[in-house]
Image: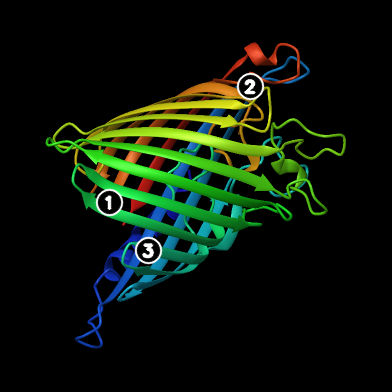
Amino acid sequence: MNRPLFSFILGVVVPAAAAAQEPSPAPQPQQQYSFEFKIDALTRQEWTRDIFETSDRFRDEKRWRLRAKPRIEAGFGPVLLGVGGDFNYSSDQNNEPPPTPQRDNYDSRDARLDLAFGSVRLGPLRAQGGRFAMPVLLTEMLWDRDLRVQGGAGTLEFRDLGALKSLSATAVYSLREHVFEVGDTTLLLLSGETTLTSPTGSELQLMGSFFKFTEFDGDKPLEPMLRRQNTRSATGVPAGPFKVVDLLARFRRTGQAPLQLVADYCWNRALDADNRGLWLALVLGSIQTTPARLEYTYAKVDKDATLGAYATDDFFWATGWEGHRADIGIRSGEHSSIHAVGQLQRFKDSPRPGEPEHWLKRIRFEWRISR
């Protein structure tokens, strides 16, 4: 790992972020004004072992990655404006030919605009426009956290309704937004959510969503390396269609022993086969309030459960796979943590003989900063 580069991040970027967090005074007494500078940073070293190849040989792969995501947000009463960048540098170059078999949801050597949005909140209604984070708290089975919405979203939310902590409905429209070229692909998402609370402070969130992807096979289709593991038509684009229903339950318990349980099930109603996905997760502890955290995830995703270009890339295959992930995180500072992550997975829907039974191993170490 490049230690001088790490020292630069620690000595320059992080102190600058801390210094910039001082709130600016309100210019007018009658107007609420806020200003924040935030940064997320990541260093990663990873090894991927026993990759299956047609020659029956196995190879080991390793790479390191540095990432910084600074952003500025300014609030003017009910209006919030934000802009942010995404800076990546990795030992590999996933945007140069010949491309890797499974392209990531980030450009390994890039500096790009990550966020540029405006939002307004009027009573229970919130509207957003521009390029912004996904407003619906989905699992990575359907939406990779590296990606952003480019378009508009509206949320109608009511809070503190007796035993209901919240009740909301959200609509999202996103057009041509990805780190890489997605042609004219569009996403329409409709979601409803409710959160129930108990006298002990535990919460149960129930959410139902409907995804519809269109134009991924039109005159300007998905970039070939983003077509991932979906079934393809004669022209090479995903055959589709993709009309996905997603049902999610999330249980949270706070206190001295935080706990979170997640169960997510999706179903592509437009197809009759290879159209379902299951994501289960358990989280013990919290980096913010406890010294350590343990997270375990199991997932099994059919190849046409969703459009693979937008699903997680941390499991190597976006769809058509089954696998396990364990993440042990240790708090290393007020705003930082160190993680050891192990994954065991297989390409269960591979058409190549022998590959569906082959389990691939991944190990990575990460240092994460968020402030």
Disc 1 secondary structure class: loop
- Quarter of the rendering containing residue 251: top left
Q: Is any atom of residue 138 visible in this view?
A: yes
Q: Nearer the viewer, mark 1 or mark 2?
A: 2
Q: Which of the two residues, 120 or 93, is positioned nearer the viewer here?
A: 120
**Against 192, is 36 above or below?**
below
* Quadrant (top left/top right/bottom left/bottom right) for the C terminus: bottom left
Q: Secondary structure at mark 3?
A: strand
Q: Residue furthest front?
A: 162
Residue furthest bottom as drawn: 28
Determine whether 147 is above or below 282 in the image.
below
Residue 53 lies, in percent from the top left, at: 73, 21
Q: Counting other residues with Cα less than 10 Å from the Cα at mark 3, is it few (<14), some (14-19), or many (20 or more)? A: some
Task: Look at 55% across and 52% down and name the residue there.
Answer: 89
Specify the amino acid type for callout 2.
Phe
- Depicted 22 relative to depicted 206: above or below: below
The amino acid on which the numbered mark 1 sits, given as a three-letter code, is His
* Residue at 61% from the left image edge and 42% from the top image edge: 104
- Which residue does the image show at 45% across and 53% down from the upper left? 170
- State left or right for residue 149 relative to residue 368: right
N-terminal of the pair, mark 3 or mark 2, is: 3
Q: Is residue 307 visible?
A: no
Question: Which of the 4 image quarters holds residue 30?
Answer: bottom left
Tag count in the figure?
A: 3
Q: Name the spot of residue 139 as percent of width and height, x first.
A: 46, 38
Label 2, on which residue? 347
